[in-house]
Image: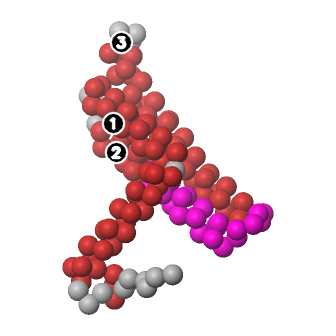
Amino acid sequence: MGRLPPRPREDPHPVKGVARSFLYAFEGLAYAWRVQRNFRLEAYLGLAALLLALWLGVDPVPVLLLVALVLSLELVNTALEALTDLASPVYHPLAKRAKDTAAAAVLLASLLALVVGLYLFLPPLLLRLGLS
């Protein structure tokens, strides 16, 4: 195992420490994109929702906030799953509970995004399609 880099708050060069923190964050984002199918799916759905909002003339801010919420919780879920696998490499009921509970947080945020999306998009979409 190699030498660990200095922690950002302990780095003697503060600007380098902040830059390194951002680099670590982007590495985590790239890891999630590469290995988590759900993260990619949620990102594509979020992009589709944003494009739909722009096409329908709906305020994109709530859409962006909900996309950020779902993707952030998916990242937390990914991190918790990795830590759980590290702490409990063999099956354990508490490890399963931790993973299931983290996944439930993503599910709740996704359902909230769906309900708010229907509220925001349905009236202008029906109007655009001439069904209202």
Front one among 124 and 76: 76
Q: Is residue 66 visible?
A: yes
Q: Is residue 121 above or below residue 81?
A: above
Q: Amino acid at mark 2?
A: Leu
Q: Are marks 2 and 1 in contact (CB under 8 Å)?
A: yes
User: How far across and how far down the image is residue 28, in percent?
Assistant: 42, 62
Q: Which residue does the numbered mark 1 point to in the structure image? A: 50
Left or right, 78 with respect to 93, comes to: left
x%, y% of residue 76?
A: 51, 61
Q: How many neighbours does mark 2 have within 10 angstroms: few (below 14), some (14-19), or many (20 or more)?
A: some
Quote the CA–CA distance across marks 3 and 2. 24 Å
Taking the spot 60% from the left edge, 62% from the top edge, the residue there is 81
Asked whether 107 or 58 is in front, the reply is: 107
Q: Are marks 3 and 1 in contact (CB under 8 Å)?
A: no
Q: Main secondary structure of the magenta part?
A: helix
Q: Nearer the viewer, mark 3 or mark 1?
A: 1
Lower sequence index among marks 2 and 1: 1
Residue where numbered disc 2 is placed: 64
The residue to which callout 3 is attached is: 129
- Residue beneath the point at 32% across and 68% down: 23
Answer with mark 3 or mark 2, whichever residue precedes in sequence.
2
Indicate the quadrant containing the C terminus: top left, top right, bottom left or bottom right: top left
State the CA–CA distance, disc 2 to disc 1. 7 Å
- Over which residues does the magenta segment extend? 71-93
* Magenta span includes 79: yes
